[in-house]
Amino acid sequence: MAKKTPLYDAHIKAGGNVVDYAGWMLPVDYEGLIPEHEAVRQRVGIFDVSHMGEIKLLGKDALKFADYVNTNDIKSLEDGHIAYGFFCDENGGVVDDLLTYKASEEDVYLVVNAANSDKDYEWLLKQADGFDVEVINVSDKTGEVAVQGPLAEKTVQKLTDFDLSTLKFFTFKRDVEIAGVKAMISRTGYTGEDGFEIYTDWDDIVKIWDKVLEAGEEFGIMPTGLGCRDTLRFEASLPLYGHEISQDVNPLEGGFKYFVKLDKEDFIGKDALKKQDEGAQERKLIGIELVDRGIAREGAKVFKDGEEIGYITTGYMSPTIGKAIANALVKKEYAKKDIDVEIQVRKRMIKAKTISKNFLRNWKKENNK
């Protein structure tokens, strides 16, 4: 049976179209994907992300252990800073992607995907052998909302005395009073816009949700669902586990080499990923723009001159850019811009071309946004 977040009743009250997602009852949308997507790009929206997994690492080796299980350089993180990275298996396949919050050398906080949280917790317990570290799963005690959009700071600032302008991108602050509730707040998100993720006790998140909606009313805030969460992250070139990265698609294939520090001392999967980097890699993610009418959905095959060269990982009619675009995992030699390809959509072949997968960044540049 699917679990409910503490905000379930709030979603029903707001007219949310609630579905089972990763074992949780969550809203796909309230008023529709397009208006919610536009609210985040142009104003401000609030997401319930209480389904995400949160795991604490405590003890003398907390930072050392976090570094060993992560592809990114966690050891060099300053206190109060956050890093994006991957848990990988020995073959370089992605166990999960995550955010690592460093409070101190003995206190590290991990935020993992909802569908993987139990698996990640068990995996971490297995890897912890030989480290002086306590691994604590606090997912079922933690509520979380994401406030995203150009007016996110103005909205949340109305609820706290803490000067949010001092909180830089990918940093966080604990024990901040927001709407009368003690919370941890980070300048992070999954939309390509400015914004915050706010964590507090399971039962207290309802108060923060209500107060943020109240504070954002003058800015046209909207409660926003899973539908636009996916279109927003896709436009911003952010991966979704099981699509752009997975146990079968490693971070280098996904185009996320920046977050894989092959020169650091050691991490799980380093040898396999080093081999990939030195020439064994056969596939890579590339952007696709459809030339013919249609939408390339996940799993659709990509062809070049009749040869199957890959498949679509995510595809949409982009609400911001106004074009049908997609990500595709293709043979490495075709992961270059301006190659004419075809996408099989049901029984017909649709003309398309390869483009950069930095959809939003390039659109903003072209349109002086």
Image: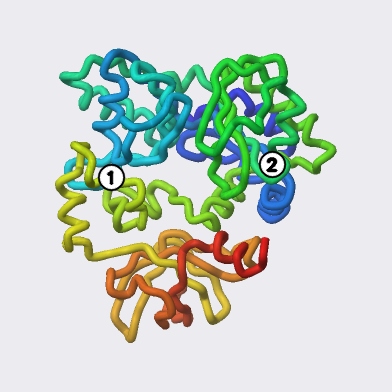
Mark 1: few/some/many CA within 10 Å (<14, 14-19, 20+): some
| Left or right of 40 on screen, residue 52 | left
Q: Residue at x 67, y 44 (%)?
A: 149
Evaluate whether residue 236 shows in this view. Answer: yes
Mark 2: few/some/many CA within 10 Å (<14, 14-19, 20+): many
Q: Is residue 149 above or below residue 209?
A: below
Q: Is residue 128 above or below residue 11?
A: above
Q: Name the amino acid type tagged 2.
A: Gly
Q: Position of residue 136 (x, y in %)?
A: 36, 17
Q: Residue at x 35, y 28 (%)?
A: 118
Q: Name the amino acid type tagged 1.
A: Lys
Q: Residue at x 36, y 53 (%)?
A: 256
User: Which quadrant of the figure has residue 95?
Assistant: top left
Give the Cα distance between marks 2 and 1: 34 Å
Q: Earlier in the sequence, mark 2 or mark 1?
A: 2
| Left or right of 103 on screen, residue 205 | right
- Closer to the camera in the image, 82 or 141: 82
Q: Position of residue 202 (x, y in %)?
A: 56, 18
The label number, if any, that marks residue 45 in the structure image: 2
- Closer to the camera in the image, 50 or 38: 38
Q: Position of residue 22 (x, y in %)?
A: 46, 38
The residue at which mark 1 appears reads as 261
Element assignment for label 2: strand
Evaluate whether residue 343 shows in this view. Answer: no
Q: Is residue 356 above or below residue 239?
A: below
Q: Residue at x 52, y 68 (%)?
A: 325
Q: Position of residue 207 (x, y in %)?
A: 70, 20
Element assignment for label 1: loop
- Closer to the camera in the image, 212 or 223: 212
